[in-house]
């Protein structure tokens, strides 16, 4: 799987450049040949948050929309017998760029790529159940997903690795795309961490 291969690539490799290094979160970027969008990889450490809370906060659409701040209006469009799910959401873009929306098929794999880990994989799809809307530009997910694993129980420490490469479509200055790709991923991690802490405090999972 392409997503797993990207996750396993050494972050210190010559192709990856570290763009953000803050407490418990590091973001890397990689330029991909013949592609305007950057490939982003982030690694974050969460302390005191159970492994189950971390993956359910992303896998359960009804829970995810309770804490998301970057991606909005999450909706489960359709669930399939194989356990995959069609999800829809949108994103407010900075002025004067038009807002974007996404339609993706989500797959949750347990004990993959190793026992005790959870991998979430997202791929863009088309469906007559959610056709493109004029007020949004439909973005295309090249590759995206999350790998969650428990590092230790005492103290309780888990990590999440995120991978994201999205073609936002339309005419957007490359400098704006590059800036948003890195800072947006960092902001998303912080929102995710706050969301998980809130879920634990309120015993929602």
Image (spheres, rainbow, N blue to C red):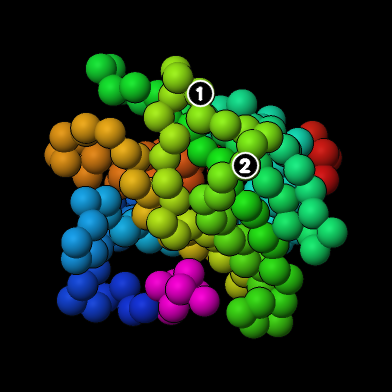
The answer to whether residue 97 is above or below residue 149 is above
Point out which mark residue 133 bears: 1
Mark 1 or 2, nearer chain start:
2
Q: Secondary structure at mark 2?
A: loop
Q: Residue at x 79, y 48 (%)?
A: 79
Tell me the quarter of the picture where residue 77 sits.
top right
Residue 138 lies left or right of residue 199; in this view the side is: left
The answer to whether residue 19 is above or below residue 138 is below
Residue 109 spot, x, y in % from top left: 70, 68
Residue 73 spot, x, y in % from top left: 61, 26
Q: Is residue 25 magenta?
A: no
Residue 83 lies left or right of residue 45; in this view the side is: right
**Does any portion of residue 20 appear in the rendered image?**
yes
Question: Are circles 1 and 2 on residues that touch, CB within 8 Å?
Answer: no
User: Residues under labels 1 and 2: Cα distance?
Assistant: 13 Å
Q: Residue at x 51, y 30 (%)?
A: 132
Q: Is residue 4 magenta?
A: yes
Q: Residues within 10 Å of mark 2 (few under 14, many from 20)?
A: few
**Does any portion of residue 69 appear in the rendered image?**
no
Q: Farthest front residue?
A: 128
What residue does disc 2 label?
Answer: 127
Q: Nearer the viewer, residue 187 or 94?
A: 94
The answer to whether residue 165 is above or below residue 68 is below
Q: Residue at x 42, y 40 (%)?
A: 139
Q: Which residues are magenta?
A: 1-8
Residue 122 lies left or right of residue 175; in this view the side is: right
């Amino acid at each position: 799987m392409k997503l797993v291969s990207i996750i396993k690539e050494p972050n210190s490799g010559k192709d990856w450049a570290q763009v953000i290094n803050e407490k418990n979160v590091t973001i890397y970027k990689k330029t991909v040949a013949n592609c305007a969008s950057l490939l982003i990889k982030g690694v974050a450490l969460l302390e005191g948050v159970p492994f189950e809370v971390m993956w359910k906060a992303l896998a359960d659409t009804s829970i995810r929309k309770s804490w998301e701040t970057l991606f909005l209006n999450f909706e489960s469009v359709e669930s399939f017998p194989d356990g995959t799910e069609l999800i829809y959401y949108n994103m407010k873009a900075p002025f004067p760029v038009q807002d974007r929306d996404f339609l993706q098929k989500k797959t949750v794999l347990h004990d993959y790529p190793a026992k005790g880990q959870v991998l979430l994989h997202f791929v863009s799809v088309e469906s007559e159940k959610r056709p493109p809307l004029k007020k949004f530009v439909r973005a295309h997910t090249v590759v995206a997903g999350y790998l969650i694993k428990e590092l230790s129980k005492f103290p309780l420490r888990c990590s999440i690795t995120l991978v994201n490469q999205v073609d936002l479509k339309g005419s957007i200055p490359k400098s704006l795309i590059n800036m948003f790709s890195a800072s947006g991923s960092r902001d998303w991690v912080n929102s995710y961490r706050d969301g998980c802490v809130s879920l634990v405090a309120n015993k929602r999972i």
